[in-house]
Image: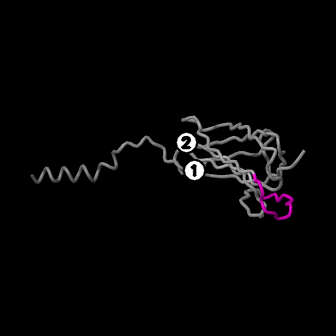
């Protein structure tokens, strides 16, 4: 009985040293690359009512990407989410009448550590012109999230 108890204690004490752990612990945020010639929109970009534009960015993660969301909402009250150091010229504060609100979530194919996102976004012809925020939120498979927030304008052509 005494040997059984000693053997049990020995197994419990030494088991962490022999445990096999093949999983990689993800402690890094995913990355959003919205710089470069093919990335769009850039900070202070103008997009036009009644037209569409193509969002383009590169997403990377050290282990595995998960999903991302895109959001575009008015900034008529001059609040801020910007992650850019460049300040854009702002229009006067105004009250929204029919502001654009775009929010969509997208899944990334399992196993990817690099992903080029290309999404066509339509700007209705009847939304308010003015200052908007364009937000990109990227989540990796482990749940880490990062975001980019830029300022854009919606205008008439």
Image vertical order of residue 79 relative to residue 9, above or below = below
- Helix, strand or loop for disc 2: loop
For image coordinates 75% across by 54% down, the residue present is: 133
Q: Residue at x 27, y 53 (%)?
A: 13
Which of the 4 image quadrants contains residue 124?
top right
Answer with left or right where residue 2 lies relative to residue 53.
left
**Residue 98: numbered disc:** none
Is 94 situated above or below 39?
below
Q: Which residues are magenta?
A: 85-99
Which label number is shown at residue 63?
2
User: Does residue 26 belong to the magenta stretch?
Assistant: no
- Left or right: 56 as drawn, with respect to 139: right
Q: List x then y, in percent, for residue 128.
A: 81, 53
Q: Write the residue at 48% across / 44% down.
A: 24
Per the image, is 89 magenta? yes
Q: Which residue is mark 1?
A: 28
**How many angstroms separate mark 2 from mark 1 (CA)?**
9 Å
Residue 136 percent coordinates (x, y): 68, 49
Labels 2 & 1 near each other (Cβ < 8 A): yes
Comes first in the chain, label 2 or label 1: 1
Q: Quarter of the image containing the C terminus?
A: top right
- Prevailing secondary structure of the magenta residues: loop
Q: Is residue 7 left or right of residue 41?
A: left
Residue neighbourhood size for the residue with mark 1, other residues' Cα within 10 Å, grouped as few (<14), some (14–19), many (≥20): few
């Amino acid at each position: 009985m005494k040997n059984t108890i000693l053997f049990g204690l020995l197994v419990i004490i030494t088991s962490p040293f022999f445990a096999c752990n093949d999983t990689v612990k993800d402690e890094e945020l995913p990355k959003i690359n919205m710089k470069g010639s093919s990335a769009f929109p850039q900070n202070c970009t103008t997009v036009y009512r009644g037209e569409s534009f193509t969002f383009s960015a590169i997403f990377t993660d050290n282990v595995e990407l998960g999903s991302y969301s895109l959001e575009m909402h008015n900034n008529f009250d001059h609040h801020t989410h910007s992650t850019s150091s460049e300040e854009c010229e702002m229009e006067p504060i105004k009250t929204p009448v029919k502001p654009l609100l775009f929010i969509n979530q997208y899944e990334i194919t399992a196993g990817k550590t690099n992903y080029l996102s290309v999404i066509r976004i339509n700007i209705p012809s009847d939304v308010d012109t003015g200052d908007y925020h364009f937000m990109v939120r990227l989540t990796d498979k482990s749940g880490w999230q990062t975001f980019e927030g830029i300022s854009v304008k919606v205008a008439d052509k």
